[in-house]
Amino acid sequence: MHTITNNYRDAHILNLGSGGERGPYLVTQTGVSPNDSLPKERMFVLRPDGRWVDFNAYACQGKPEAMDEIVFSTTAEVMTTFGKLFGRPQVLNLPVDEAGLNDWIERQKSGNPLEAAKAWATGYQERHRKKRRG
């Protein structure tokens, strides 16, 4: 098990765009938090504020808008955030609702997770357009 880092080479940048669109982007890294007293491998996501968080803390919420705060609009935004990260990764410990997480896992079994991510991204793009229009 490796401890997560702030090095962009250790992360994966996923383009959640559909239909040839670019973005939104999700930045993930699988590993152990440097703060864990008992190492437990998890999938972390980088938030635009530069903090890493367990993906399950967002997946368990069951509402698409919750995921909006863990994506980047552009790859330039991703690289700007990585450029501000130094030293030990800051990991934000958010609660994980086990029942909500189990519901999310069940939904993934019954469908295609990639299609679910693309459907969420389409909703994200629409919500984002509405925000810009005010």
Image (tube, rainbow, N blue to C red):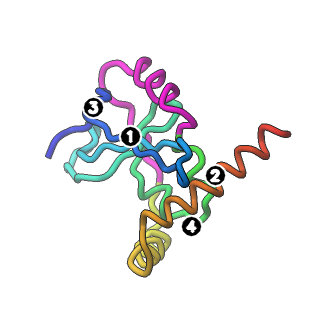
Mark 3 vs 4, N-terminal side: 3
Mark 1 vs 4, N-terminal side: 1
Circle 2 residue: 124
Circle 3 residue: 5
Q: Who's the residue at 32% across and 51% down the image? A: 43
Badge 1: how crowded within 10 Å, few (<14), some, or many (20+)?
Answer: some
Helix, strand or loop under label 1:
strand
**Callout 1 amino acid:** Ile
In the image, the segment drawn in magenta is 72-94
Badge 4: how crowded within 10 Å, few (<14), some, or many (20+)?
Answer: few
**Callout 4 amino acid:** Gly
Q: Give me the disc on residue 101.
A: none
> Residues at badges 2 and 4 in contact (C-beta under 8 Å)?
no
Helix, strand or loop under label 4:
loop
Tell whether position 134 is magenta.
no
Q: Position of residue 47 (x, y in %)?
A: 49, 38
- Which quarter of the rendered picture does the C terminus lie within? top right
Q: Position of residue 102 (x, y in %)?
A: 42, 75
Between the C-alphas of marks 1 and 2, the distance is 17 Å
Mark 1 vs 3, N-terminal side: 3
Mark 2 vs 4, N-terminal side: 4
Helix, strand or loop under label 2:
helix
Circle 4 residue: 62
Helix, strand or loop under label 3:
loop
Answer left or right for 35 relative to 66: left
Circle 1 residue: 13
